[in-house]
Image (cartoon, rainbow, N blue to C red):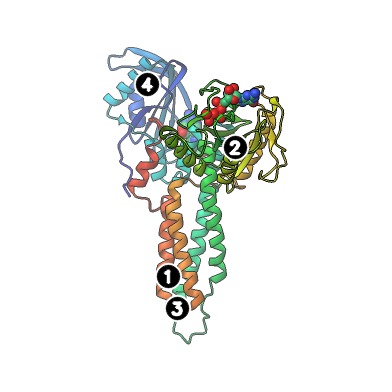
Amino acid sequence: MTMPTPDTIVAISTPRGYSGIGVVRMSGPDSLPILTQIFMPTAADGFNDRTAVHGKLVDRDGRILDDGIAVFMRGPGSYTGEDVVEISLHGSPVILDAAVGLILASGARMAQRGEFTRRAFLNGKLDLLQAEAVVDLIESKTEGAAREARLRLDKGMSSRIANIASTLKDILAELEAHMDFDEDDENPAPDPESRLAALISEFTALQRSVDSSRMHRDGIRVVIAGKPNVGKSTLFNTLMGSNRVIVTPYPGTTRDPVDDFLVLNGMGFLLCDTAGMRQEPDPIEREGIFRTQQRIDNADIAIVVLDGSAPLDQEDEKVLCTCREKASITVLNKADLGLVIDPGHPLLQSTAIPISAKTGFGIQDLEEQLRMTGSARFSSDAGSLLSSWCVQPLASAEQHVKAVLDGLHTRSMAPEIIALELKKALEYLEEITGERADDGILDRIFERFCIGK
Ligand SMILES: Nc1nc2c(c(=O)[nH]1)N(C=O)[C@@H](CNc1ccc(C(=O)N[C@@H](CCC(=O)O)C(=O)O)cc1)CN2
Ligand SMILES: Nc1nc2c(ncn2[C@@H]2O[C@H](COP(=O)(O)OP(=O)(O)OP(=O)(O)O)[C@@H](O)[C@H]2O)c(=O)[nH]1
Ligand SMILES: [Mg+2]
């Protein structure tokens, strides 16, 4: 792992544009010396650790560029663990750029994306999962997503991985202690089987959490499916509250899947309108239907739309069958024309909701059902979620633990091999917390950050 470079970095930490206040941040050993060169405190007592100081930003010729407030935070008791300086100035890009220019001229260099947080990570201020939670928090589009990221930042996840790791370390230590003794020693052989078996269910729970994490961040994927002309696009527009997609009386109107982000009571959904599915499509429609099928496969929830004003037919049955394995909600659309399908029809998975996408009738019921089905899809323990890059190391760690369990079960594994397998499992877990993460993983995570974070 690369060690933190001892240079001093600078960046504007607030968005570019015109704002009340803008913040320029430095981190590194020269932060304070540079500050004293460019910022003249109004009062005589200068800069004390963690104390706001009013003063003037001055250039090399002594010209005053702005007045502002500077705070010096001495490392390691700072966000990055290094000496940090923040200068709040008037929020004009011209002034903020000028301040950065002065700081660069004094020997600092521009920070890369996420470099402040990267340094915080390298200095042990937060681990990799927390660093990732920081960027998820900043990017969160819903209250729910923000809450979940905030919980992760407060350590939820890392401690669960750490708990698994510490169980493995205990077992490893017992095993190694035992290996140092002779066979006939009174020291009994350790029996870690039940503890390892408990870890397997923890692995399963963690893997489930990966899905929840994605749903929080990107929204729950909801696909609207049905045969042509049942009103899928009309429903999409009604739920979105806009005329986003084309609606016509002609079957086969929608060709490409269209996605849009929908927020219901703080819960985010990625809603997808699709091409109608039918048996004998033309070549263009065939490609559209292929894409519909892909979206259905990848969706967390399917809304199956039926034309409730006409009897069920084979095409409807086909769609219902396609969505059988999924969490799905069936709606009987065009209820304004009079329903001929019974909402309790045996072919329907659960009770169907009568709606009219055209008049808005029943839409509230549908939204309520969406929220309920959405909540049910989330892993129950929010704040202990993992993102998708963790899947691989997690699965590998689990595999090694399973190998040990198999070995113990059949009594076919030498203690040395067991120890080796446990160490491998530990290495994968340390990849997740960042104790052993290589630069590639770090780059991938910090790439998502903005400059100044
Ligand atoms: N002005 C400002 N606001 C900010 C940040 C910041 O860096 N500057 N943050 C960040 O981007 C977030 C807050 N996170 C922070 C986390 C730790 C420390 C810090 O100084 N930690 C020290 C001391 C802890 C203490 O005394 O309470 C440490 O961990 O040793 C600062 C900010 C959001 N708001
Ligand atoms: N009376 C009534 N008509 C509706 C309702 N919903 C949709 N329609 C009409 O049904 C026709 C088809 O609607 P679309 O939303 O384009 O149907 P679709 O399922 O997206 O069709 P494809 O894209 O071809 O698969 C249009 O003429 C709509 O105005 C409804 O609730 N009541
Ligand atoms: Mg359509």
Instruction: Assess whether mark 3 and mark 1 are in contact (beta carbons under 8 angstroms).
Output: no
| The quadrant where residue 333 appears | top right
| Residue ID for mark 3 | 412
Residue 218 coordinates in the image, percent (x, y): 50, 36
Work out whether mark 2 precedes mark 4 in sequence or the reverse, and give the earlier one.
4
- The type of residue carrying mark 4 is Phe
State left or right for residue 141 relative to residue 99. right
Q: Secondary structure at mark 3?
A: loop
**Mark pair 3, 2: CA separation:** 51 Å
Work out whether 373 lies above or below 17. below
Whether residue 373 can be seen here: yes
Q: Quadrant of residue 375?
A: top right
- Which residue is at the far top? 63
Residue at the disc numbered 2: 303
Marked residue nearer the N-terminal end (3 or 2) = 2
Give amino acid for label 3.
Answer: Ser
Q: Name the residue carrying label 4.
A: 39
Q: CA distance from mark 2 to mark 4?
A: 60 Å
Please identify the residue farthest to the front as the structure is shown: 280
Tell which circle, 1 or 2, labels the residue nearer the N-terminal end.
2
**Residue 233 appearing in the image:** no
Where is residue 3 shown, x and y percent of the image? 32, 46
Q: Is mark 1 within 8 Å of ligand 1?
A: no
Say which label, 1 or 3, has the lower sequence index: 3
Question: Distance between the Cα atoms at labels 1 and 2?
Answer: 50 Å
Give the SS element for disc 2. strand
